Structures are given as structure tokens and as C-alpha cells.
Amino acid sequence: LNAELQLDRLKPRLSRRILLLQDHQPSWHKALALTPGTAPLCHNLTAYLRDEAEFKDKLSPVALSLRLALPEGTQGLVLYGDTLVQAQVGG
């Protein structure tokens, strides 16, 4: 499977407010090899909110999306595509 995570996806790429700690990027891509009978795959990713001085929009929700698709050679079938996740967190 090809997995793609997008952080703060409703914002233009250069003005996203949340980045991944490992590479300071707003997205993550990974090819996942699944084999029947093996243990489930888990990936933990840590993200951080950029300093408030670096962006103006502090009120709109942060939208995340996760897309799981079969590789290109399998007719590009999308199994679970562009799921939008949002939550309002009080502060």
C-alpha cells in the first residue's frame, strides 16, 4: 500500500502551521508492504505547531488527511482516500 499523510492540508504548502518533527515537512509518504499472517504495521509520527509569530491564522481548524492506495501497477485503486479529520481543541 502507498500511505500519504497531509497535515493542515487546507492551507497552501508553504504556510502550513503543523510540521512533522522528523523532517520539518507537512506531509509523510510511505510504501507499506503487507504480508498475510504477519503482525499489523504501526507508525508513530510526532508533529509540532510552528511558533505563532510565523503565521497569521490562529482560528481556523487544522485539517489532516490520510490516503491509502494500491501501487500504480494495480490500476491505482484507492482504498481509503482523502479522509478529513478535524477537531476543535480549547486552550
Image (spheres, rainbow, N blue to C red):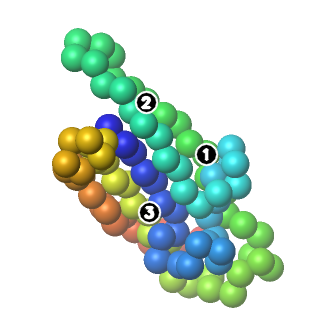
Left or right for 75, reference 12: left
Three-letter amino acid code at the position of disc 1: Thr
Compared to residue 26, the image places residue 70 above or below, namely above
Give the Cα distance between marks 1 and 3.
Answer: 13 Å
Q: Nearer the viewer, residue 11 or 60?
A: 11
At horizontal 53% and vertical 50% (from top left) the residue drawn is 28
Question: Which residue in the rendered view is the most extreme toward the bottom?
Answer: 56
Left or right for 48, reference 9: right
Q: Secondary structure at mark 1?
A: loop
Three-letter amino acid code at the position of disc 3: Leu
Disc 1 target residue: 46
Q: Secondary structure at mark 3?
A: strand
Disc 2 target residue: 42
Question: Which residue in the rendered view is the most extreme toward the front?
Answer: 73
Give the Cα distance between marks 2 and 3.
Answer: 18 Å
Q: Residue 64, which numbered label?
A: 3
Q: Are there few (<14), some (14-19), or many (20+) residues within 10 Å of tag 1? A: few
- Residue 12: % across, % down: 56, 79
Compared to residue 40, the image places residue 31 above or below, namely below
